Image (tube, grey):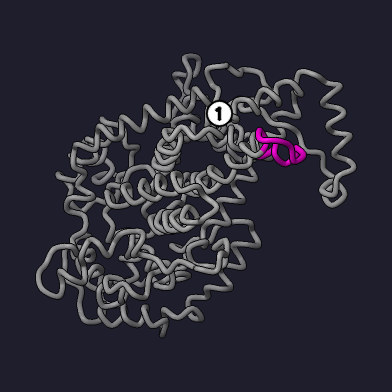
Amino acid sequence: MLEDMKYCEDHLGVVFIAFCTDNGGDTRGFRVRLKRLKPKLVVPPCWGHQVNLVVGEVIELKIPCMRSIDSSLDVVKWFTNHSQALGLLKEEQKSSERFQATHRILTLIFPVISRWTFHFLAVRRILTLSPPLPQFWKNLAEVKIILEPLAIAAKCMQAPDAGLDQVLLMLGNLYRIYGSHEITTRVRNCVQKSLEKRWLAMERDVFILTLYFNPYIRGTAFSKKNPALKPIALFTTAKKLYKRFFDEEPDLDFHAAFFDYSRNIKEFSATYMQLEATKQMYERENKRVSVVAVWEHLLTEDSGGRNGLVKLAILLLSIVANSAGSERGFSKFGIFLTKLRSQLSIQKELGLITDRIKRKFMKFAEECGVESGGMQGYDETDSFAGLSTQLIQDLQADNTSNGDSDDESSDGDENAEGSGDDEFVHSPSHYTLKQLFEYPTDGSDGLENALGFHWQYGIKDLQEELEVYDLLMEDD
């Protein structure tokens, strides 16, 4: 791996700023060693995988309602195997208010994919089609309440552009949601403790400054009572990270630029950066806003000064905190690079893959790892009980590997070092999720709050995944 990285640096001009893998024993150990060899690197774990581990901790509680998931899938199987009953279910839908509004018949979906989010979506669909009945349905409703926020967060964390700012906002919103009295005390304590544990293992000052450099958020999400989140404290972090990544001290123009940004003035004002117009253009194209692209409009050829702040913001916001993109790339190459195609050139393989991913449905289907055909390929070992066992095993492996100190936590919070007033302001206690954010208290869902900036995309992505599964089941 080190030889490959050196080749990319020497021959391709690649500048490595981060290295992300899942948190398995070997890959975690490699990240720790790589950080020691290259201390400039940010080495986060894959946050798509981290959310799965939080789900594993919830499953480990052995909450009775979770047992109803596999029972609900027996209901789906029964309807799927009895065409007359399935036809009656579809006819019944035509008299519902939902059908009158949408003119759409919903299908029952069956988890032909070994992924917990698919099981969750199957439960959510059967709840949509079911009348209010006894305890069984109440159990399913409780499952939905417990797992839905994690399913939305999982889709956000797996996005190809899921940056450090997005991860931190997801953690804050999850912490807020699971603090609700609608969640049982055991689940609430379990999830919030798990989120704090995983957050405290991160290079927290890097995540916090990256979120601050999101021009749509800036400091609006942070707690106004926390001294570590004041602009002057964040400037200390910015200075240290600038020196770390660019091997030089920032000058006075960098200082002035940072505080102009914090005050939303001059070239860093929302008006000059065209934030609202940019957001509308991306929404018109049904895309996520690229905050990196917003900053790139300010980029000049100056090596430092005010442009130094722009370069630091782009660098931090460019870091993707998951390995999903690489894994999808490997999967697509595996489809084409077979024994019969072993002599294909790299250019030919890339051409085939590019043609393939242009077709939207196939892109979603390949990400799901299935072909059309309803329940074809389902294995009883892929039940939710089987997936639960796997998630708990992954969790136990992660807990075992935690014995190896991650450089992210041990020397990542550079601001925690110091003495006197500086040590007080940058105390690690100020960086807990509980102390980090200005949590809304009006019971809102957070979509209009800074914490919900990316949440809407997770809801949309989860719905798109459900629509793909609908297509797969309709082909049965």
Q: Main secondary structure of the magenta part?
A: helix
User: Can you tell which quarter of the image residue 471 is in?
Assistant: top right
Give the residue at x 15% y 45%: 36
403 vs 161, left or right, is left
Q: 69 and 155: which one is in front?
A: 69
Residue furthest to the top? 339
Residue furthest to the front? 134
Q: Return the x and y of residue 129 as percentages of the image width and height.
A: 76, 38
Category of crowding for the residue at label 1, using alpha-carbon neighbours closer than 10 angstroms: few (below 14), some (14–19), many (at least 20): some
Residue type of the residue flagged with mark 1: Arg
Label 1 sits on a secondary structure element that is: helix
Q: Is residue 67 magenta?
A: no
Task: Specify the quadrant that holds the C terminus.
Answer: top right
Range covered by the magenta-colored residues: 124-137
Q: 49 and 67: which one is in front?
A: 67
Q: Return the x and y of residue 437 as percentages of the image width and height.
A: 39, 66
76 vs 303, left or right, is right
How many badges with numbers are in the image? 1
326 vs 305, left or right, is right
Q: Is residue 324 above or below residue 255?
A: above
Q: Return the x and y of residue 179 as percentages of the image width and height.
A: 46, 56
- Whether residue 336 is visible to the viewer of this picture, yes or no, is no
Q: Is residue 440 above or below residue 190?
A: below
Give the residue at x 49% y 22%: 386
Give the residue at x 38% y 64%: 211
The residue that mark 1 highlights is: 67
Q: Is residue 134 magenta?
A: yes
Task: Specify the quadrant that holds the N terminus.
Answer: top left
